Amino acid sequence: MLYRQRRGLLLIAVAFLGNATTASATSIEQREYQILVEGKEVGQSNMTITRQDDGTTVMKGDASVRISKGIINFSFSNESTEWWKDGRLIGLKAVTTENKRKTELTVSADNNRLRLWVNNKEKPVQQDPWVNSYWKLPDAKYHNKRVPVLEVDAGREHNALLKFVGTENMAIAGQQEKCYHFKLTGGPNAVDLWFDQYYLLVRQEFVEQGHRTVVQIKSVKR
């Protein structure tokens, strides 16, 4: 039974990745972010968005943070790829290392439902989650309502409230643009999120262990 389960997982992954790699890209966009804690830059994040001619959007992202202050030493890195189609998550692969502790996460579509593995152990998962990379705004049906959020770095899930705050002007790659401000509550931390006219992330703010953390866009290449 265990062999069949592993073989089935392998076939799903091979088929999924095969379909993802054979489709040709119609557009590619790159975004670079800086990560600040209490106003000091401690890391960076990069995102590449590929829109394919079959309607699939692929987001490849990475983030790294290193803090060394007195006796405090903290390191974090994440590399992940998300596959989306028709506004829904259809696949995800991520590797996160926090202070040398590694977590591997895989999500695959299987007969119109999602299956989640965390460190090779399958866990239940809701069927239409938002991922806490927050790289894009979720479907309008979740605005001012509850949205299931999947934590890409740990494989945990929670139902959070996504509330629209308003529109604000923000600097994006040196130009002022109108952005949409949302606030997400009900998870481990409340998060403020800003998205541009393309509904892509430009800034997020949250407090982690009493420290204000900001992820702010630096550059956009299309």
Image: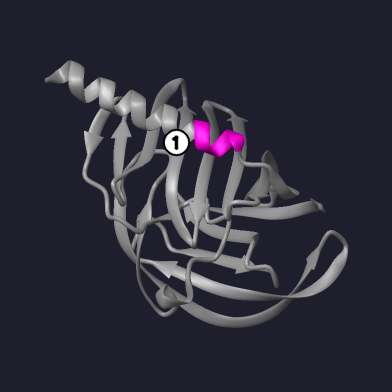
- Residue 88: x %, y % from top left: 44, 58
- Magenta residue check for 19: yes
Disc 1 element: helix
Considering every residue shown, the one lying at the far bottom of the view is: 166
Q: Neighbour class for label 1 at 10 Å: few (<14), some, many (≥20)?
A: some
Query: Which quarter of the picture shows residue 147?
Result: bottom left
Determine if residue 13 is in view: yes
- Residue ID at (37%, 40%): 107
- Residue 200: x %, y % from top left: 64, 62
- Magenta residue check for 15: no
- Residue ID at (43%, 27%): 14
Helix, strand or loop for the magenta stretch, by majority: helix
Whether residue 199 is situated above or below residue 112 in the rendered picture: below
Query: Which quarter of the picture shows residue 130?
Result: bottom left
- Residue ID at (73%, 55%): 217
Residue interval drawn in magenta: 18-22
The one nearer the camera, 220 or 73, is 220
Determine if residue 33 is in view: no
Residue topped by disc 1: 16
Whether residue 114 is situated above or below residue 77 in the rendered picture: below
- Residue ID at (35%, 59%): 128
- Residue 169: x %, y % from top left: 75, 77
The one nearer the camera, 151 or 8, is 8
| Quadrant in which the N terminus is drawn | top left
Image-based side of 177 in relation to 196, left or right: right
The one nearer the camera, 211 or 62, is 62
Considering every residue shown, the one lying at the far right of the view is: 174
Q: What's the amino acid at mark 1?
A: Phe
Considering every residue shown, the one lying at the far left of the view is: 1
- Residue 165: x %, y % from top left: 54, 81
Image-based side of 3 in relation to 64, left or right: left
